[in-house]
Image (spheres, rainbow, N blue to C red):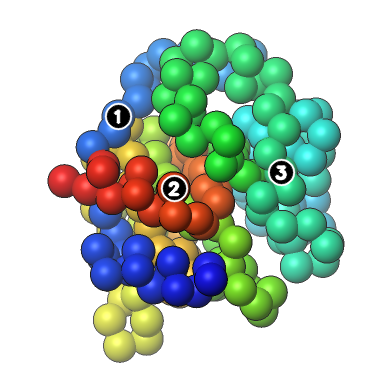
Amino acid sequence: MSWELLSRLSQYGDFLNLQSRINVDRVLSDINNFEWIKYNPNKPNIPRDCINVTSLDGEENGYTGNLSVHTSTDLDFKVPTKVYYSSEVLQNFLSPWKQYLGRTQFLRLPPGGYFPPHHDGGRSGVPCAFRLVIPLKNFNPPYFCWMYGDENNYKPLQWNRGHLYYLNTNKKHWLFNTGAEDSIWLTMNIKICEETIFMLRGLIQ
């Protein structure tokens, strides 16, 4: 069923600027006192960090990296942390999605940080979630590139600050920061179901 729903979603496009915005200055101020932790402790040499908005048990310091080495899925990381409750802006923004919310986190790629080319979900089979993304700081070329496509049509994506985007991350993508400032994002994994497809369709411009 998830493949059928994902196929239906893909008819609207792979990269969609949705009619939803977040107050970037407020939300960055709200998370300022929280500690950034390693995104994937198994790959300590890659500079990238996160602040968990949701986790397996509601703790901010839970495992956040590659799920392929665990039996958990993105939808198991659904318990709100203190980060969620610390920001009224964040709560209001996530409220429509809350019952469908999976792994949600702020990501930080400092200068030199990157994600190598990959497809989300790996070889785990039927996808359970789709990805929503919000760029918050240093997110466009030439200083930051989110490359997307395939070997024959690879291009950097262009983003607007604080806008909510749907991105089909089952397709190959990779990220790298060549600038002098951190790149910061908010990423949300949303359960694939009839209700969330309907909600997303209502936000397409």
According to the image, label 2 marks what residue? 195
Check disc 1: other Cα within 10 Å, few if <14, some if 14-19, many if 20+: some
* Residue 56 versus residue 23 in the image, above or below: below
* Front residue (pair 192, 134): 192
Check disc 3: other Cα within 10 Å, few if <14, some if 14-19, many if 20+: many
Type of the residue with mark 2 = Glu
Residue visible at 65% across and 77% down? 125
Image position, residue 48 (x, y; %)? 62, 47
According to the image, label 3 marks what residue? 77
Q: CA distance from mark 2 to mark 1?
A: 21 Å
Type of the residue with mark 3 = Phe
Q: Secondary structure at mark 3?
A: loop
* Residue 127 versus residue 84 in the image, above or below: below
Residue visible at 52% across and 48% down? 190
Image position, residue 119 (x, y; %)? 53, 72
Check whether the beta carbons of the residues at disc 2 and disc 1 lie within 8 A of each other.
Answer: no
Q: Residue furthest left?
A: 205
Q: Earlier in the sequence, mark 3 or mark 2?
A: 3
According to the image, label 1 marks what residue? 21
Residue visible at 54% across and 14% down? 87
* Front residue (pair 32, 111): 32
Image position, residue 133 (x, y; %)? 42, 45
Q: Say the numbered circle drawn on residue 115.
A: none
